[in-house]
Amino acid sequence: MMDIQEILKRLPHRYPFLLVDRVLELEKGKRILALKNVTMNEPFFTGHFPNRPVMPGVMMLEALAQAAAILAFDNTGVRPDDDTVFYFVGIDNARFKRPVVPGDQLMLHATLDRAKAGIVKFTARAMVGEAVAAQADLMCTMRRVT
């Protein structure tokens, strides 16, 4: 288990863009299960949608990518710093199955499928209870920037 203090050490994201609240399970080099508590205080709910707040699909994908980044950083033993960035490079087979609303707990599952030529591929799904909210194949890369 990893609390928010440890997550802040492992991800460069900060409010309002940090979308992982807790890591519940982490199997090095294999999989992660993380949690995002969805609250009415999320800044995107102001405009999406004022009378019927729904978490944007791209934010669900970003939450999945952040969970996947924790798994990737853990797998390589690298910690993010001012010179290391973990970029999205591709999203395939994205599907949105259920709206996510304030009060939901978004369970973020990511499995590391392969790491080759600097590209890491994950299978990811976001669940609310037993229902799939979003799923996608994510591709990311870690880069040193100067």
Image (cartoon, rainbow, N blue to C red):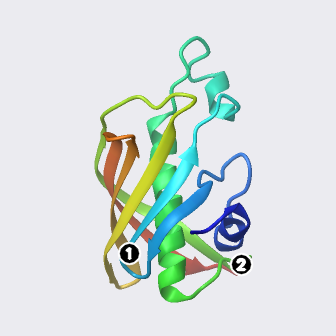
The amino acid on which the numbered mark 2 sits, given as a three-letter code, is Asp
Q: Residue furthest left?
A: 93
Dot label at residue 120: 1
Out of 68 and 33, give the one closest to the viewer.
33
Q: Is residue 23 above or below residue 82?
A: above
Q: Residue at x 71, y 73 (%)?
A: 9
Asked whether disc 2 touches disc 1, contact meaning CB atoms under 8 Å apart, the reply is no
Residue 141 seen in the figure = no
Above or below, 66 against 58 in this view is below
User: Between disc 2 and disc 1, whose residue precedes?
Assistant: 2
Residue 17 placed where, x, y %? 66, 49
User: Residue 32: x percent and y percent?
Assistant: 43, 67
Q: Is residue 107 visible?
A: yes
Q: Is residue 52 above or below residue 123?
A: above
Q: Determine crowd level at label 2: few under 14, some 14-19, many 20+ residues with C-alpha closer than 10 A.
A: few
Q: Amino acid at mark 1?
A: Val
Pick the quarter of the image with the N terminus: bottom right
Quarter location, residue 49: top right
Which residue corresponds to mark 2? 81
**Helix, strand or loop status at disc 1:** strand
Q: Is residue 117 left or right of residue 34?
A: left
* Residue 106 position (above or below residue 41): below
61 left or right of 115 in image = right
